[in-house]
Amino acid sequence: MQNESLSHPMKTESAPKPISTYGNPPKSLVAFAQRHQDKIREVGDERGTEDGYWIYLKAGFCWDDQGLHSLHENTVSDIIRAFGSVMPCRCKDCAEQL
């Protein structure tokens, strides 16, 4: 008799692809980016150059009315708060990449 607690052999559940990072971003920022990887392409830590944290958005998304494709703040809480203003982008560059 087969063990029925085994998962179905044809069923595969893939883990989310790890988010791209550079520098040494805090785990909290990486975890946030992982939860929003449908919009986030990469996160960076540039505190060593006094340039704070960065979030780079995937094609199809921008931050604020100026159509910026990246966010920059000095603290994790500020960049997470700023991420709330991310919106769909219909600029020429995004349209070409989609």
Image (tube, rainbow, N blue to C red):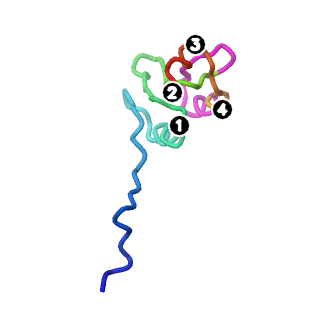
Q: Earlier in the sequence, mark 3 or mark 1?
A: 1
Q: Residue at x 67, y 20 (%)?
A: 64
Q: Position of residue 46 (x, y in %)?
A: 43, 21
3D distance between C-alphas at marks 4 and 1? 14 Å
Which numbered disc, 3 or 1, marks the residue closer to the eye?
Answer: 3
The numbered mark at residue 21 is none
The foreground one among 32 and 39 is 39
Q: Earlier in the sequence, mark 3 or mark 2?
A: 2
Q: Secondary structure at mark 4?
A: loop
Tell me, yes or no, whether the two marked residues, 4 and 2, touch with CB atoms within 8 Å. Answer: no
The numbered mark at residue 84 is 4
Q: Earlier in the sequence, mark 4 or mark 2?
A: 2
Q: Earlier in the sequence, mark 3 or mark 4?
A: 4
Q: Secondary structure at mark 1?
A: loop
**Amino acid type indicated by mark 1:** Asp
Q: Position of residue 29 (x, y in %)?
A: 49, 37
Q: Residue at x 49, y 24 (%)?
A: 56
Say above or below: 28 vs 54.
below
Counting the numbered discs, the total is 4
Whether residue 78 appears in magenta in the rendering, the answer is: yes
3D distance between C-alphas at marks 3 and 4? 23 Å
| Residue under label 2 | 58
**Amino acid type indicated by mark 4:** Gly
Magenta segment, which residues? 64-82
| Residue under label 1 | 38
| Residue under label 3 | 92
3D distance between C-alphas at marks 3 and 2? 14 Å
**Amino acid type indicated by mark 2:** Lys
Q: Earlier in the sequence, mark 4 or mark 1?
A: 1
